[in-house]
Image (cartoon, rainbow, N blue to C red):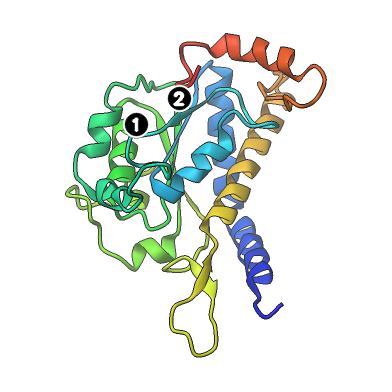
Amino acid sequence: MRTDYVPRVLQLLQQAYERQQVSLRMAAEWIADALQADGLLYVFGASHAGILTEELTYRAGGLVPVSPIFVPGLTCDVRPLPLTSALERLDGYALAAIKHIPISPADVALVHSVSGRNAAPVEVALYAKQQGAKVIALTSLEYSQSVSPRSSTGYRLFEVADLVIDNGAPAGDAVVQLEGFPQPVAPVSTVLGAALANAIVAEACAILNERGIAPPVFMSANLDGGDAHNAKLMERYRGRVLYL
């Protein structure tokens, strides 16, 4: 290999995991408490940050009561795709889309944004806080602290969340520098974020299990018995999780 992308990812992930132990554990405890109280985990990200929303939703080995917040125009299936950049910066757009979502004080909201500077993630976080939910930001502090807020609130995501998980991604996200080429290539925020988010979910399940509560976890639909197992769990949350 001419590049060191995988070693860089492994290094950054190990550093983030070691530095974020307390925050990761707290996030897991909040989620376990919410699920024990029959609450939900809401997840949001705009554009590529929304890939983590998909990763945690309807996922084999993942939690059933994950309610994804998919705002029209802020997902990667919109055309033209650059529209996502314009809309996530537009003040009031995300708020208009989510203000009827019944987030409650029993819930937890995980908001993912690497730079944390745009209006959409800030508005989602503030709305969830106003509803009484605990808000976890998954972001890059190095990146976010190097840029100014674009939201009219004057805040970046890490400044409005109740708990911050720092993924350790560098400003600009990309980590591979090619000789004689000024633009770094190969972003790391998705792989780092997915690993940290799944680590939080796994820890939340372990906490519930220790409390004598069976974690509501999807079984692979491609295993025998998976459909029946999943149908029973989904029925419990039907009408509350946004896609059921």
Q: Is residue 56 above or below residue 191?
A: above
Quadrant position of residue 105:
top left
Residue visible at 38% across and 45% down in the picture: 46
Distance in Å between CA atoms under marks 1 and 2: 9 Å
Residue 35 image position (x, y, % from top left): 56, 22
In this view, 176 is above or below 10: below
Q: Is residue 187 left or right of residue 70?
A: right
Image position, residue 51 (x, y; %): 50, 44
Q: Amino acid at mark 2?
A: Asp
Name the outermost residue toward the front: 79
Task: Write down the residue under mark 2.
Answer: 107
- Residue found 71% across the figure and 19% down from its top: 214
Residue 68 image offset from top left, x and y in percent:
46, 30
Which quadrant would residue 57 be assigned to in this image?
top right
**In this view of the protein, which residue sits in the foreground, 170 or 239?**
239
Of the numbered discs in the image, which one, if any, rests on residue 128?
1
Which corner quadrant of the image does residue 17 belong to? bottom right
Instruction: Indicate left or right for 113 with 84 as reference.
Output: right
Q: Which type of secondary structure does the marked residue at label 1 adopt?
A: helix
> Going by the image, does 227 lie left or right of 28?
right
Which comes sooner in the sequence, label 1 or label 2?
2
Q: Relative to the observer, which residue lies in front, 103 or 208?
A: 103
